[in-house]
């Protein structure tokens, strides 16, 4: 019942570049646009699919559910009747159910991205390590192009119940066998590959994900053999490299089968090469942190302000905050911030970089759905053209951002430079090499001088929400004594972080230490690092007090003890699961230094 394959030679993607505009100057690149060049112009802990009402099923229900079978295995020539297959390019109802998976703690961020006009998803419902939504096929394509903080997009194929009156493995087999006409999903003449991953929670007789995946593969292979005498081979590069990656969710005998539209994780934008900093955030997590910090909201406010000013013939006074990462490592946070400022669709960047590499790329094309028999090439081309035009319009309106990065390790900065060049944003980011305690920049002094800085902690609100903009926004992932898990360790399983909703309460535990026992234990993917964590956080504190008066800072940490050296109390803690580690995103408000009092003023006070 396995679907083993010896080779998987894929042709190169001949779509070529879609004409993505790069930012700013650069003699070696064509078609670049400066920000504001037309300032007067116009502007898994995964439980699949949520718990929908059981009367709203597109497969079995209480009235038409097959009669229970008492057989341990089906007869040799048992005939299986497939459910009607509605391909994503032309579903009978015009709508499909989807599920976008993400890191635990980023569900609301992904939901906001789905609700945006750039995607236009319907019935958006945050769930556990993911968000369910509905829409026509175009919405599925747009979700893959525009989602920054999601891991992958799944489209539902079939939904129903496992037959609890037969053996668990057989129940899975029967469900999957009937789920679709598999000879249409995996046609013989295309020689497509498929793979199945499963998640199982409290199902009758189904004791492991391995059992569920194996029996699902058996069902599909048997269906293909019965239909045309052909058994496909497995993909060479594992599940995500399959032409038709499938995902089976089994929750208390409720079964949902999905096709994975994305294939490779959406965090793989394509701008990072094989050499990756050992503690680097993946791109989806970095985008989620920036969204929570308010950077994309500030970018959108700047564009809206310029649009309003242009309409009445005036100049916008809204200023983007200076974004700085004093311990930037390989620069993922800064690169994602630059892509947000330029409104570059991450999926468009991914498709272009993969197409540029051709057969040398990991998958040959940007998304798995591009290899499906029901793929609508014209629709994808239209979505990509729409994304390119949206980015072009945004870059004409948006002010040029000031994005600063610093790191003490030259090797990490070399990786950051290479990644920024590949993403086309190296002209927007200024990198420096040195200790964070010594890091300074004229833009930081200008940001402090141009805006009134409150002197009381309670008066310092989030920088991204200030009406006139400006200020300093720090977003960073300083060393905290643990390495994040491998890039794929946080795939659909959702990092299995222990969620504690009380930690999202801004009034719960204002100190940095003693988050909870699970945070101190750090299970699930971390390994000890010998770096001097305490010195790193002391350097961060020195930088804050000298350069960041009135700033808002968002720092990621997976160790409560590591943050003590900062000697500051966080305003808020958010629980996130990143790289298999239970983390906190700590929000700080930085007071300006107290003015020095001269001798004459001291004497006057004493008198």
Image (spheres, grey):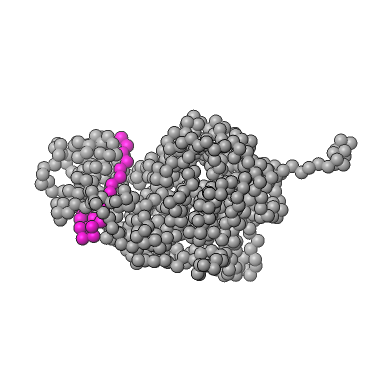
State whether residue 343 appears in this view: no
* Residue 268 higher or lower than 162, as above or below: below
Residue at 61% x, 37% y is: 535
Q: Residue at x 50, y 37 (%)?
A: 529
Considering every residue shown, the one lying at the far top of the view is 517
| Residue 69 visible to an observer of this rendering | yes
Residue at x 46% of width, y 65% of height: 20
Could you say which is closer to the camera, residue 57 or residue 336? 336
x, y percentage for residue 394?
53, 63
Relative image position of residue 48 (x, y in whole percent)? 34, 45
Q: Tell me which segment is drawn in magenta.
A: 179-203
Image-quadrant location for residue 492: top left
Instruction: Based on the picture, tell me whether residue 520 belongs to the magenta stretch.
Output: no
Q: Does the magenta stretch include residue 199?
A: yes
Q: In which quarter of the image is residue 127?
A: top left
Label count reads: 0
Q: Which residue lies furthest to the front in this view?
A: 411
Above or below, 241 against 104 in this view is below
């Amino acid at each position: 019942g396995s679907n083993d394959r010896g080779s998987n030679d894929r042709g190169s993607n001949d779509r070529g570049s879609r004409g993505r505009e790069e930012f700013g100057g650069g003699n070696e690149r064509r078609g670049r646009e400066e920000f504001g060049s037309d300032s007067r112009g116009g502007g898994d802990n995964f439980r699949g699919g949520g718990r929908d009402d059981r009367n709203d099923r597109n497969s079995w229900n209480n009235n038409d559910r097959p009669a229970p079978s008492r057989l341990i295995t089906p007869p040799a020539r048992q005939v299986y009747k497939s459910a009607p297959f509605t391909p994503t390019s032309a579903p009978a109802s015009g709508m499909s159910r989807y599920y976008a998976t993400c890191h635990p703690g980023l569900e609301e961020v992904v939901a906001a991205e789905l609700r945006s006009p750039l995607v236009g998803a319907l019935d958006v419902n945050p769930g556990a390590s993911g968000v369910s939504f509905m829409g026509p096929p175009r919405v599925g394509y747009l979700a893959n192009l525009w989602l920054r903080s999601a891991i992958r997009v799944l489209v539902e194929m079939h939904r129903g119940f496992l037959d609890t009156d037969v053996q668990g493995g057989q129940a899975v087999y029967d469900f999957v066998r009937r789920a679709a006409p598999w000879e249409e999903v995996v046609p013989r003449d295309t020689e497509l590959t498929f793979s199945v991953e499963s998640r199982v929670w409290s199902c009758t007789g189904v004791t492991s994900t391995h059992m569920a995946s194996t029996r699902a593969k058996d069902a599909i292979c048997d269906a293909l053999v019965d239909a045309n005498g052909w058994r496909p081979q497995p993909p060479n590069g594992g599940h995500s490299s399959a032409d038709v990656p499938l995902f089976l969710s089994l929750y208390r005998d409720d079964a949902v089968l999905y096709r994975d539209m994305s294939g490779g994780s959406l965090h793989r934008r394509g701008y990072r090469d094989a050499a990756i900093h050992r503690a680097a955030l993946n791109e989806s997590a970095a985008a989620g942190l920036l969204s929570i910090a308010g950077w994309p909201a500030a970018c959108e406010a700047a564009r809206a302000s310029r649009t309003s000013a242009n309409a009445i013939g005036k100049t916008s006074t809204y200023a983007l905050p200076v974004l700085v990462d004093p311990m930037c490592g390989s620069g993922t946070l800064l690169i994602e911030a630059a892509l947000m400022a330029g409104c570059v669709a991450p999926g468009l960047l991914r498709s272009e970089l993969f197409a540029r590499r051709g057969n040398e790329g990991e998958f040959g094309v940007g998304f798995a759905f591009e290899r499906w028999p029901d793929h609508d090439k014209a629709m994808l081309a239209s979505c990509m053209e729409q994304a390119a035009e949206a980015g072009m319009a945004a870059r004409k309106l948006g002010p040029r951002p000031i994005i600063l990065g610093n790191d003490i390790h030259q090797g990490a900065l070399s990786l950051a430079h290479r990644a920024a060049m590949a993403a086309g944003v190296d002209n927007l980011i200024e990198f420096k090499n040195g200790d964070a305690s010594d890091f300074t920049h004229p833009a930081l002094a200008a940001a402090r001088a141009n805006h009134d800085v409150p002197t009381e902690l309670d008066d310092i609100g989030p920088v991204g929400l200030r009406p006139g903009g400006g200020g300093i926004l720090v977003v960073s992932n300083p060393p905290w004594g643990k390495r994040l898990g491998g890039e794929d360790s946080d795939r659909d399983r959702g990092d299995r972080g222990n969620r504690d909703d009380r930690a999202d309460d801004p009034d719960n535990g204002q100190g940095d230490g003693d988050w909870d026992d699970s945070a101190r234990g750090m299970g699930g993917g971390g390994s000890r690092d010998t770096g001097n964590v305490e010195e790193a956080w002391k350097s961060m504190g020195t930088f804050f007090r000298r350069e960041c008066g009135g700033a808002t800072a968002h720092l990621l940490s997976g160790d409560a003890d590591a943050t003590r050296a900062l000697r500051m109390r966080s305003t808020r803690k958010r629980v996130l699961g990143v790289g298999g580690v239970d983390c906190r995103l700590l929000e700080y408000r930085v007071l300006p230094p107290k003015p020095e009092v001269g001798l004459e003023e001291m004497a006057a006070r004493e008198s």
